[in-house]
Amino acid sequence: MLPRWALWLPGVWLGILLCIALIAAPAAFAVLPAADAGRVVSRIFVQEGWLSLALAALLLFLQRRPQQRGLFAVRRTGLGNASLLWATVLCTLLGYFAVQSLMPAARAGQGPFSFGQLHAVSTVFYAIKTLAVAVLAWRAVRD
């Protein structure tokens, strides 16, 4: 049963990331005042950050199982799936947890970076994470 999880979890994870970016966040800003929408979206990204760390940890665990081949077999060319999973962890830690701690000061006009700069940095990390998960999902379907 666990090897099957390794095949469908990247697709589910990708769906969650895309739904947040393309549906949930824009919808919040479309129907709520900006301050309220920011709080709602911030809460969504807290939950997404922890979920991403948990899914990456689970997939890394499944990859280390000796009988596991297929999706997490080491590839001779390009980035291996373990590298992509570690990239998602790094993007989550930097893009959400590190940048988020700087945002209240930036919103108040303090600190070395503007809110817009921090938002752009976190968006880039989210996009890189989404791309890495998309590659994992594509490889799962391919294998």
Image (spheres, grey):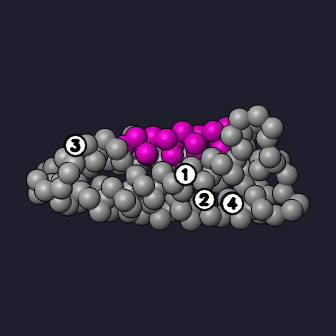
Front in this rendered view, residue 46 or 24: 46
Prevalent SS, magenta region: helix
Q: Which mark is residue 88?
A: 1
Q: Answer few, some or many: residues within 10 Å of disc 2's Cα (few below 14, many 20 plus, some between 14 and 19).
A: many
Q: Tag 4's secondary structure?
A: helix
- Residue 141 visible in this rendered orientation of the protein: yes
Name the mark nearer the viewer: 3 or 2: 3
* Dots 1, 2 in contact, CB < 8 A: yes
Q: Tag 3's secondary structure?
A: helix
The residue depicted at 73 percent of the width and 50 percent of the height is 7
* Dots 4, 2 in contact, CB < 8 A: yes
Q: Is residue 38 left or right of residue 21?
A: left
Q: Which mark is residue 56?
A: 2
Q: Which residue is mark 3?
A: 116
Quadrant for the N terminus in the image:
bottom right
Q: How much space separates mark 3 and mark 2, taking CA atoms?
A: 28 Å
Q: Is residue 135 magenta?
A: yes
| Lower position in the chain sequence, tag 3 or tag 4 | 4
| Lower position in the chain sequence, tag 1 or tag 2 | 2
Front in this rendered view, residue 127 or 91: 91
- Kindly identify the amino acid type of the residue bearing the numbered disc 2: Ala
Q: From which residue to which does the magenta span run? A: 123-138
